[in-house]
Image (cartoon, helix red, strand yellow):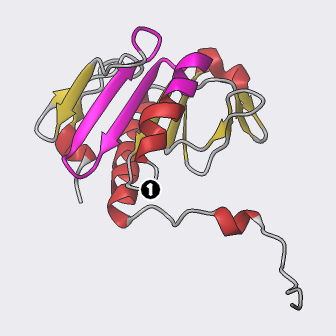
Amino acid sequence: MKAVAMEPLTVEDYRLPAPNRYHQDISLNITLLVGKYLEKHPIGKLYTAPFDVYFDEINVHQPDLVFVSKKNQSILTYAGAEGAPDFIVEILSPKTAGLDKKSKRRVFARCGVKELWLIDPEPKLVHVYFLQKDAERPAAIYREQDTFTSPHFPGLKIKGVTIFKK
């Protein structure tokens, strides 16, 4: 039997497909909402994926959205962030939902992330976790018709309909 020469695998061989268009719409909707708020209230910086967050020596993730307060800005580096951002948004997709809901959520909690939103596009739900209080159960679940707030953005009213706008 003749040996077949194979090319070595590269990072691209393991790359997941880009998020779908609705995922991108949700990400942009939140970016615009929080971005406008931050223009008037420059209390920190918002970053969108791809943006590397080095949580520890073995956990590097690219959350969909990352907010780092001015008080926590020392974690920002040329490469991204080294340490826990204050606030993270993960928009669930079928291929990554299990990771986002379990292992990544636990890494975020263990490393000090304060607030996590897991956004489920299909039933149009926002699961809000205050990870330093309870990493296993959401503090609240909001629907498309709900309006809510975040302690990271005082005075900002967040409308589910704005988040889920297509």
Q: How many marks?
A: 1
Q: Amino acid at mark 1?
A: Lys
Q: Quadrant of the C terminus?
A: bottom left
List the single residue furthest toward the bottom.
2
Q: Check disc 1: other Cα within 10 Å, few if <14, some if 14-19, many if 20+.
A: few
The relative height of residue 70 versus residue 7 in the rendered view (above or below) is above
Q: Quadrant of the N terminus?
A: bottom right
Q: Where on the picture, by quarter, is residue 153? A: top left
Magenta stretch contains residue 111: yes
From the top left corner, tell me how far across and down residue 93 is, in percent. 39, 53
19 relative position to 159: left or right: right
List the single residue furthest toward the front.
1
11 relative position to 86: left or right: right
In the image, 6 versus 93, the foreground residue is 6
From the top left corner, tell me how far across and down residue 5 is, in percent. 88, 84
User: What's the residue at 39%, 12% (across, down)?
Assistant: 134
| Residue 112 visible (yes or no) | no
Magenta stretch bounds: 106-134
User: What's the residue at 42%, 27% (across, down)?
Assistant: 116
104 relative position to 21: left or right: right
From the top left corner, tell me how far across and down residue 149 is, in percent. 27, 23
Magenta stretch contains residue 25: no
List the single residue furthest toward the top.
133
The relative height of residue 95 versus residue 82 in the rendered view (above or below) is below
| Residue 123 visible (yes or no) | yes
127 relative position to 110: left or right: left
**Circle 1 sits on which residue?**
95
User: What's the residue at 59%, 44% (across, down)?
Assistant: 62
What element does badge 1 sit on?
loop
The relative height of residue 4 versus residue 94 in the rendered view (above or below) is below
In the image, 77 versus 43, the foreground residue is 77
User: What's the residue at 62%, 23% (across, down)?
Assistant: 84
